[in-house]
Amino acid sequence: MSEFTEIAEEILGDLLSTHGFVCVDKVQDLAVFESTTCTLTVGHDSQRSSEVFMGLNRRDGTCEPDFNFGEVVRAASVPSGLQPTGYAVRDEKSVRRLLQEMSALLTTYCVPLLRGDRSAWSKLVSQRDADATHYAIENRVRLALNSATAAWHAKDFEKVMEVLGPLRPMLGASDRAKLEYAERKLRDDGEQQ
């Protein structure tokens, strides 16, 4: 296979130079392009995963870490059916195909980001914040559901209520039914005493 950076420069070069980017550094599997406002890094992990990666960041250092290509295309509202389904490559032909696909998506959807447009960057930052919030909520719910399942099997209905109660709006039908059962069971047990 030709050197990855040469392929990347060949495929991305016209797009990037149109928006003021120049290649400022390249080593065997990594090329760094900069404009007055942005840095775009493209690389190939030839030693482990054999995946192509692309990162985009502002040059002013306000965004860390780099935004990966998936974040960039989601924030640019690229339809999910057009987004790459994977970044693993096995040969020069697949590297070229993936980089051409990424270049086409950048050209069609991401030019405002490449130009350093503040509103496009604000949307990208907001997307990352929303993703982080969603991830934190998913983890909180998953941990709560694990705890509630253990409490359910132990017939500790007070614990089921304590764990699931605050999450009621996020519960599926089955877990909501368990919560309602636990509430009834505790209410009925309280009335019998």
Image (cartoon, grey):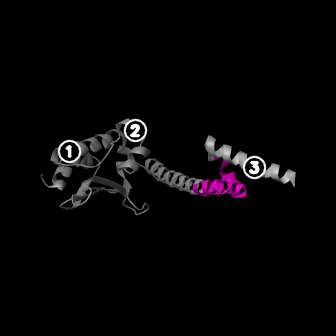
The three-letter amino acid code for the residue at tag 1 is Ser
Q: Is residue 163 magenta?
A: yes
Instruction: Name the residue that disc number 2 marks.
Output: 80
Instruction: Name the residue that disc number 1 marks.
Output: 94
Rate crowding at label 1 as few (under 14), some (14 to 19) or many (20 or more) other CA atoms within 10 Å. Answer: few
- Camera-near label (1 vs 3) is 3
Left-right relation of 193 to 150: right
Which of the image's four quarters has the C terminus?
bottom right
**Secondary structure at numbered mark 3:** helix
Q: Residue at x 43, y 60 (%)?
A: 63
Q: Where residue 124 sits in the image (x, y, percent)?
A: 45, 50
Which of the two residues, 169 or 102, is positioned nearer the viewer here? Answer: 169
Q: Residue at x 57, y 57 (%)?
A: 143
Which of the two residues, 46 or 155, is positioned nearer the viewer here? Answer: 155
The three-letter amino acid code for the residue at tag 3 is Glu
How far is the residue under mark 2 from the one under mark 1? 20 Å
Residue found at the very far left of the displayed protein: 2
The residue range painted magenta reads: 146-169
Q: Quadrant of residue 107?
A: top left
Q: Residue at x 47, y 53 (%)?
A: 128
Instruction: Name the residue that disc number 3 marks.
Output: 183
Left-right relation of 41 to 152: left
Q: Are marks 2 and 1 in contact (CB under 8 Å)?
A: no
How far is the residue under mark 1 from the one under mark 3? 57 Å
